[in-house]
Image: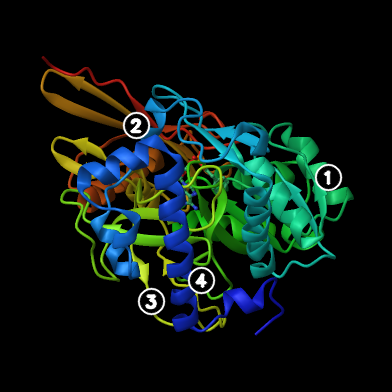
Amino acid sequence: MGMYYQPEIETMPREELRDLQLDRMKWSVKHAYDNIDFFKSSFDEAGVSPEDLNSLEDLAKFPFVVKQDMRDAYPFGMFAVPMKDVARIHASSGTTGQATVVGHTKRDLKNWGDCFARGIAMVGGSDESTIQVSYGYGLFTGGLGGHAGGEAMGCTVIPTSSGNTKRQVQFMADCDTDILACTPSYALFIADTAIEMGYDPAKEFKISGVICGAEPASENMRQEIADKLGVQYCDVYGLSEIMGPGVAMECIERGGLHIAEDQFYCEIVDPDTGEVLPDGEWGELVITTLTRECSPLIRYRTRDVTRIIEQPCACGRTHRKIDRLRGRTDDMLIIRGVNVFPSQIEQVITGFPEIATQYQIILTNKGPLDHVELQVETEPDFQIDEVRKLEDLKRRLQAELKSNLQVAVDVKIVEPKTIERSMGKAKRVIDKREVSA
Ligand code: DLL
């Protein structure tokens, strides 16, 4: 077992950890009930009160809170502390509807930094490491979350934020970056840019770890990033409503992300019935914050699909893991009645060495029938002008997609670098379907 950032918490015996969780959960539930009107009315309506919580399992008696509830409370209706104690606010992008605002006290920010710092330790980082934070800074939680983690660990932090990709590469090369934190799509873009600039980052750069999250990445995409940069890949999960990056992070053993269980209690529920599912079953992740002062959330429905993995981890950490995220219940595409996650499409295309990892799905409909176009790029060394080879590639890819997804996909192969690159979360799906009356 290596050196950990907070070993006394991360390797706590499970019984002790559960006791700690229950104490904190009692505090959090009461804190929410006493200080936030929404929780008072929602608990009252469901006929439960904070006194009904006597075991961790009792939490299932409490009602859920969803994103819309937070929107309705915009901007500060769900804050449990007076404004003078609010050190910072963040907001979700709000591309669909009203943004949601989340507040953090000083202590909330400290806990957040500590959570992210555990991930830095998971990729072998220490106070001697240099971390380059290439998540966007601002209302999005990636930049400042990664930044807080680097500072908590005592790293040298390079706050490049996202954008200006050649300069990102230059900093990595010149400042001996050890750890890069950014979205997987941006990590790949940075790696490709470095290669284009004539570097072999896996050999020439000091970098040894990436902390990537904010969007799903297929196994092959992770492998491509790890190979091109020559790094250990740590998947980091989080969401602005609950905190930001650092809710769960992946250690060197892989096979799932350790939940920061001293800070968050996770349940998996059936997305349709809301019933709590046993460990190991796939369903929707529901999170309860255990320590948050400004924006406590009791049973927040994330819409993210995963499962809990309970076997002990060889790294020594006792915090349970969630499996890598499959996608969101609301990202799931229903194409001709079939459920399809964009990540399934990604998994298929990354199995074709001739095809680059960038892709875009364009959905249209003619009458009642959905039409799916998948745009993919060839790798730069593929002879795209050889028509027969191209036709053959297209046919094989279409067949593979059809057998994996059970849906016909119209593949359009385009030249390298045609599809727009993302410096944050990639936009994989363009849905132009008109809803029929
Ligand atoms: O994306 C926070 C974050 C920043 C996480 C940087 C990791 C790294 P939001 O913008 O609120 O917050 O989006 C949260 O992104 O509900 C998931 O659907 C998705 N997501 C986050 N991390 C992962 C991951 C940030 N590791 C939403 N794998 C979440 C897959 C992820 N999806």
Q: Nearer the viewer, residue 234 or 412?
A: 234
- 74 horizontally vs 69: left or right: right
For residue 299, above or below residue 186: below
Give yes or no for contact between labels 4 and 1 (Cβ–Cβ under 8 Å): no
Which residue in the protein does label 4 denote?
254
Q: Residue 171 carries which label?
A: 1
Mark with earlier residue (1, 2): 2
Q: What residue type is labelled 3?
A: Glu
Camera-nearest label, 4 or 2: 2
Q: Disc 1 on helix, strand or loop? A: helix
Which residue in the protein does label 3 denote?
310
Q: Distance between the residues labelled 3 and 2?
A: 31 Å
Mark with earlier residue (4, 1): 1
Q: Where is residue 413 in the image (x, y as percent from the top left)?
A: 41, 34
Q: Position of residue 22 (x, y in %)?
A: 42, 69
Q: Give the residue at the far top of this rendering.
A: 437
Q: How far apart are marks 4 and 1 (CA)?
A: 28 Å
Q: Which of 146 and 385 is in front in this view?
A: 146
Q: Which of 203 and 322 is in front in this view?
A: 322
Which residue in the protein does label 2 denote?
68
